[in-house]
Amino acid sequence: MKCVTCRGPAIIDIRRHNSNFCAEHFIEQCHRQVRKAIEEFSMFEPSDRLLVAVSGGKDSLAIWDLLRDLGYDADGLYVGLGIGQYSDASLDVARAFAEKRQLKLLEVDVPSTFGFDIPNGSRLAKRVPCSACGLSKRHLFDEAAINGGYDVLVTGHNLDDEAAVLFGNTLHWHTEYLGRQLPVLPARNGFPRKVKPLVRLAERETAAYCIVKGIDYLIDECPMAAGNKHLSYKNALNEIERMSPGAKHSFYFGFLDRAAGFFAEESSIDREGLGTCASCGAPTTAEICAFCRLVDRAGGRLPDQSGVSAVPVDLGPTRSHSVQ
Ligand code: Q46
Ligand code: ZN
Ligand code: ZN
């Protein structure tokens, strides 16, 4: 197996591109694909301030690293969800990554700030854990990006993630979500711009990127993910991809090219007529936003001040300690 660029020994084959790469040219390939996604979808400009949602997993650390390699000004944000050992380990990994590279990592800890954790809070609120978790993360990511004055919120969703979500939304014809499943959501009504620059890279490639670059990431999956539908959709698509390399790419990018526009109007309806949450000030169609209602039902409490500031992590004497 030879690298398509230099004919040296290859370390990875990418069947959908019909290409093999050595370590050096694989990293170049990752840079190229991320740059292409940023340009193709006009995600952001070099002058923009980016906030990367960091979980400690391979995707979020890979995109943070890639964006810094490409010269972007990108800070990280870690949201602690109180999922036992998994949360403890993921925080350690995120902090170690930032510390090693002298990057700024903001943190919001849900249990100490809001008085509930995802496993217990979701049970009390009678919600599926991933639904309570997703809602909390979205709210806290948005809030930290807006309060921190960032231009863009970056997430590490890769091609496999987007294809699996699209698969699920199509299977059930969740048309209100289909028009919103885009690599860029523009800023509006108090929401930050949100982008997914990894959409052109598969999960296997972000893992390989981390290994080649020596990035320590948390390999363990969240224990609450076991049995969720997203994983079964991923497995189904992996089987299709195995028989037909490139199937995920053409499914997702074909949707963006030819179908997403049909659902745009329906998806925008629930963003019209937004007011602000009487409790935290976040944009919402109800009097109290979904996150504040979750906090209440989960047996938690809202902090005194309106909104919560993400706190820069103390990375030693050279780092800023100020609370934003
Ligand atoms: S962290 Fe949260 Fe995921 Fe764990 S509880 Fe579900 S949504 S699986 S990305
Ligand atoms: Zn090469
Ligand atoms: Zn609220």
Image (tube, rainbow, N blue to C red):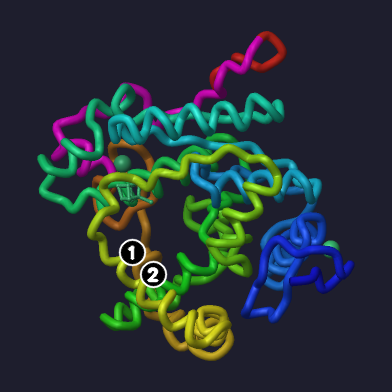
Q: In this view, does 137 lie to the left or right of 243?
A: left
Q: Judge whether residue 116 is colored magenta.
A: no
Q: Is residue 282 left or right of residue 225?
A: right
Q: For residue 50, what is the image quadrant? A: top right
Residue at disc 1, secondary structure: helix
Magenta region, mostly helix, strand or loop? loop
Residue at x-position 40% and y-position 71%: 164
Q: Does the residue labelled 2 lie within 8 Å of ligand 1?
A: no
Residue 234's disc is 2
Q: Is the C-beta separation of discs 2 and 1 under 8 Å?
A: yes
Q: Name the residue under label 1.
A: 231
Measured in 3D between alpha carbons, the distance from the residue under mark 2 to the one under mark 1, in whole angstroms, is 5 Å
Quarter of the image with the C terminus is: top right
Magenta span covers which residues? 291-316
Residue at x-position 39% and y-position 50%: 283
Residue at disc 2, secondary structure: helix
Viewer-proximal residue among 282 and 148: 148
Viewer-proximal residue among 132 and 265: 132
Viewer-proximal residue among 245 and 82: 245
Q: Compared with residue 112, is residue 177 higher up or lower down, i.e. above or below?
A: below
